[in-house]
Each structure stands twice: as structure tokens, then as C-alpha cells.
């Protein structure tokens, strides 16, 4: 069964001049762990479809028909009133939104509240859904000690029998396991750190410049992996594999090597006492701390940790975009809607953001809808593609089918407007005319005024969805002829 299934969705906006038919009889589906690309020109209804799924529509929006089934539950059955408007702040939807479905909003430049620190805005999402999770560990702990506690907490939790939690387990046993884990991790970290110090002569400089943290992490990884076999409780779980733990330890090394105190725990009996004190934090903070989650996500998206307490105006455009990605991930949702995640970013930053999104999908096994008017962005990341025009999905199928076996004139025109690095050089095609007004869309096929293949039937009758191949659909009267490349240009 698909994770998300949208059936016959109709979302219109009531304005002074009538009804804006932003989403008109749209059906899509998305399997768990897959990515759907939603492409089309600006104003075709892509963002409205995303807001309909997340139930974030403005007050003048009316959902006239259709269903949005997420994880077996019809979300519209919960919130839709008799007049088609949606109930605001419904508790059942609030539980789902951001915890199971989150969104990377279009225009991260304006998505954050300018008078609150960015880190606090991300922490707020955690506190709303998990009010028992404290904001942060005690201020007396150093950052590298907090990292040790987090490593041990995840490992202890992974080692518990199915159905058992830290809270429901014997605290004496948890404390003992935690102490052994902390001592083991600290020993590995200190041995690898000493090897790094020897390699760089005690100064982390190269050609007079400070060596970046990610370079130190890469240098530390093989040292850590060689010693990680001595860990007493092998970590398990999709997000706590031996490789992930080794990376966390390598990152921990770069934290405390820059601190004046070069000892993680101390020596001899003092080290064990410190480990026992830190192990108590596992019992006090069985679900970790909100700010530590933010630190981990900032590290994941490549934002320096000292920027957590900055205000939005102190972030660059790329940092705001990555912070928005971190916010969307903070509760490990099953499903993310990314609305124009690379808009206004340079090509280097676009590439980095896309790689990060693919990485997070693999690591967290999430499903995703990526909304864009840039076909090249969607081609990079999507398994399936839905092409939208004037409020309707005009072609839907696997990414390869859309690019190699195009079955709709608009999809062909859209693809022709982007350069290709393969094949002979040719002049880019343009689509004549402008997208229609959704207040009064054309009768029949909505693309017919701009379509060079249009016939008499196109202006008189609206087409139906035609399956031109397995799982490949086209909203065109001549879909089969077009897919077979036998349709003649009429204009």
C-alpha cells in the first residue's frame, strides 16, 4: 500500500472575481522510501498541492472533493467541513504535521521568524511534539562530554530487548552499561586523537592555515575503525551502525582537541567516576536533549555549531536553506515535501543541497515530494515525476519514462526548454504564449491554445488520463499517437 495516495483532489480559492482552480482533479501516489518530482511552470498548482497535503491552506481555500490518504488515514476526513474549508489547528493533524509529514518551505529567506534565534525555532518544533524532552543538557557539561553521553545513550538503547525502553529498564543495569560504553568510546577517541596529534605535530595547521574539521574527521576515521572492535556492546539499528558510530567518534575527536582541556574523562579512578556521572545523564535524559538534536542536524547539513544561536539575518541564503532542511528533519518524519529547495542558490550550492537530500533519504528511509519548475533538479533526485499544467497533472510516470518516452506535448515542450549535456547542440525550444488564468481556464484541454499538435477535439472536449505504458499516464486525446511518435505537428 502506498504511503501517500491523493485521489481526485480539487482545491480552489475564493477571490473577488470568482474561483481560482489551483488544483483540479489531481491524483498521485508515493511509495515508502521513494521520491516524486512535481514539475511545471510557476502558478500551475504545485505548491497548493503541497499545502493541501500538509493542511496549511489559507482561509479562502476550499477543498471541493477528493481524498488525501496518508499511512492508511484520510486526512481530509479529519479536517474538512461541509462547506469544504478546513478546520484550523485540529489536534489530530497537529500530531501528524512535522512529526510524520514536514515541509521545506519555498523561500527560506522569509520562512524564519526574524526576532527569534534559528536554533530556538527548531527546538520549538521538538517541544511541541515531545514536551518531556528537555531543551539541553546541564550547562556544566562540555560539548565533547555531551557527545559521549549521546553516543552511549544510542548504543544502550539499541542493545535493549524489543519493547524495552531506557525508562522501563533497570537503572542500575543502564548505568553500568552506559559507564562501560563511555569508557570504551573515550579510550578509542583518546588513542586516535593522540595519533592525530603526532601526525600534525600538535598543531592542526597546514601551510599556515587551520585544517578544516571535515578533513580531521576523514583523517580520524581509519584510526577509529581500527580500534572500534573493542566496543563492548556492538551498536545496531539503521541510524546507529558501526560505520555511523565511527564517524561520530571521529567528529567527537575534533571537538575536544580544540578545547584547552585535552582529557575527555581524566585518568584512573577519576575517569571511571566521570564516566559514571555521565552515565547518569542517560537515565535523566532517556530521549536526549532538543538542542543536541539540533547540533547533530547542523553537523549533517554542514552548518557550524556556533551558528545555532544566531538570528536569521545573520545567516547567508544557503545557510537559511540548509537550516530549513534541518528543521524539516528534526522529528525524523516519514515524509517530506520540499518546495523549490534550491531556488535562488548558485549551482554549487544547489548540487550540495541535492546531495544532502539524497543522503538524508538513504539514512532515514524517508519518502519525499520535491516541487520545482527546474526539470534538471528533479531529474537528479526523483524516482517518479508528475508534470503539472494549469492545475492538472498532464503526465505521470517513472522518471525514465518521462524523459525517454514522453507522452504529452507540454512535457515535451518543458523538457525542450532545458539544455542537455548529451547529443548535438541545438537551439532551446520555447513554449509560445503564457499559462492560462486559473480563474477562467480554457475549455477542453487546458494546454490546447499553446499546443502545436492540437486538433478540433482539444478545444471542445477535456481529455481523460490514458495509460500509455505500465504506470505511465498522459492527459491527452492523442497520448498513444504522441508516445508512438506518429503524431503530426498541426501548427
Image (cartoon, grey):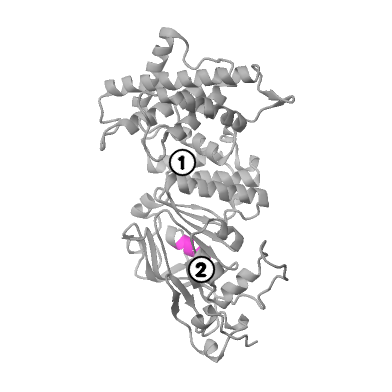
Whether 93 is among the magenta residues is no
Q: Where is residue 114 in the image (x, y as percent from the top left)?
A: 59, 44
Marker disc for residue 124? 1
Q: Can residue 13 be seen in this view?
A: no
Q: Position of residue 334 (x, y in %)?
A: 40, 50
Q: Where is residue 388 in the image (x, y as percent from the top left)?
A: 53, 70
| Label 2: how many Cα within 10 Å (few below 14, some 14–19, many 20+) | some
Q: Nearer the viewer, mark 2 or mark 1?
A: 2
Q: Where is residue 401 in the image (x, y as percent from the top left)?
A: 51, 68
Q: Residue at x 40, y 32 (%)?
A: 288
User: What residue span does the magenta drawing correspond to?
Assistant: 46-52
Q: Quadrant of residue 323?
A: top right
Indicate whether 469 appears above or below 336: below
Main SS of the magenta part reads helix
Is 420 on the left-hand or right-hand side of 457? right
> As drawn, which residue projects farthest toward the bottom?
456
* Element type where label 1 sits in the image: helix
Is 178 on the left-hand or right-hand side of 125? left
The residue carrying mark 2 is 401
Q: Which residue is drawn at 46% across and 71% down?
A: 472
Indicate whether 380 appears above or below 115: below
Quote the CA–CA distance across marks 2 and 1. Answer: 42 Å
Indicate whether 146 appears above or below 408: above
Amino acid at each position: 500500500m502506498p504511503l501517500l495516495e491523493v485521489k481526485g483532489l480539487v482545491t480552489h480559492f475564493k477571490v473577488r472575481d470568482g474561483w481560482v482552480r489551483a488544483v483540479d482533479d489531481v491524483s498521485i501516489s508515493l511509495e515508502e522510501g521513494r521520491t516524486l518530482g512535481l514539475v511545471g511552470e510557476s502558478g500551475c498548482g504545485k505548491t497548493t498541492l503541497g499545502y493541501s497535503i500538509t493542511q496549511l491552506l489559507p482561509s479562502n481555500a476550499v477543498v471541493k472533493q477528493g481524498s488525501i490518504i496518508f499511512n492508511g488515514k484520510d486526512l481530509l476526513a479529519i479536517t474538512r467541513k461541509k462547506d469544504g474549508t478546513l478546520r484550523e489547528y485540529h489536534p489530530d493533524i497537529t500530531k501528524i504535521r512535522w512529526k510524520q509529514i514536514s515541509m521545506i518551505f519555498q523561500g527560506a529567506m522569509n520562512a524564519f521568524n526574524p526576532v527569534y534565534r534559528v536554533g530556538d525555532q527548531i527546538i520549538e518544533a521538538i517541544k511541541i511534539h515531545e514536551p518531556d524532552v528537555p531543551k539541553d543538557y546541564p550547562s556544566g557539561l562540555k560539548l565533547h562530554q555531551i557527545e559521549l553521553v549521546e553516543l552511549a545513550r544510542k548504543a544502550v538503547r539499541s542493545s535493549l530487548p524489543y519493547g524495552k525502553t531506557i525508562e522501563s529498564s533497570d537503572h542500575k543495569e543502564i548505568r553500568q552499561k552506559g559507564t562501560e560504553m563511555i569508557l570504551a568510546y573515550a579510550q578509542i577517541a583518546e588513542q586516535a586523537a593522540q595519533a592525530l596529534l603526532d601526525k600534525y605535530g600538535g598543531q592542526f595547521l597546514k601551510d599556515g592555515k587551520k585544517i578544516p574539521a571535515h578533513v580531521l574527521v576523514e583523517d580520524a576515521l581509519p584510526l577509529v575503525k581500527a580500534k572500534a572492535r573493542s566496543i563492548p556492546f556492538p551498536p545496531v539499528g539503521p541510524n546507529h551502525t558501526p560505520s555511523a558510530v565511527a564517524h561520530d567518534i571521529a567528529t567527537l575527536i575534533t571537538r575536544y582537541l580544540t578545547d584547552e582541556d585535552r582529557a575527555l574523562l581524566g585518568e584512573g579512578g577519576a575517569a571511571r567516576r566521570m564516566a559514571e556521572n555521565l552515565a547518569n545523564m542517560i537515565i535523566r535524559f532517556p530521549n536526549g536533549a532538543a538542542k543536541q538534536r539540533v547540533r547533530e542536524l547542523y553537523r549533517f547539513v554542514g552548518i557550524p555549531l556556533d551558528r545555532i544561536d544566531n538570528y536569521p539575518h545573520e545567516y547567508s541564503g544557503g545557510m537559511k536553506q540548509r537550516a530549513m532542511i534541518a528543521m524539516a528533519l528534526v522529528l525524523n518524519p516519514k515524509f517530506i515535501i520540499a518546495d523549490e529547495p534550491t531556488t535562488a542558490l548558485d549551482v554549487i550550492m544547489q548540487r550540495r543541497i541535492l546531495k544532502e537530500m539524497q543522503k538524508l533519504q538513504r539514512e532515514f528511509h524517508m519518502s519525499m515530494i520535491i516541487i520545482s519548475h527546474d526539470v534538471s533538479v528533479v531529474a537528479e533526485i526523483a524516482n517518479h515525476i508528475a508534470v503539472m499544467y494549469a492545475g492538472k497533472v498532464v503526465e505521470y510516470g517513472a522518471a525514465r519514462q518521462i524523459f525517454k518516452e514522453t507522452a504529452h506535448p507540454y512535457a515535451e515542450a518543458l523538457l525542450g526548454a532545458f539544455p542537455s549535456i548529451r547529443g548535438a547542440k541545438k537551439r532551446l525550444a520555447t513554449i509560445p504564449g503564457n499559462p492560462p488564468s486559473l480563474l477562467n481556464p480554457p475549455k477542453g484541454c487546458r494546454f490546447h491554445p499553446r499546443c502545436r499538435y492540437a486538433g478540433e477535439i482539444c478545444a471542445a472536449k477535456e481529455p481523460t488520463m490514458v495509460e500509455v505504458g505500465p504506470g505511465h499516464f498522459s492527459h491527452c486525446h492523442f497520448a498513444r499517437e504522441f508516445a508512438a511518435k506518429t503524431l503530426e505537428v498541426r501548427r
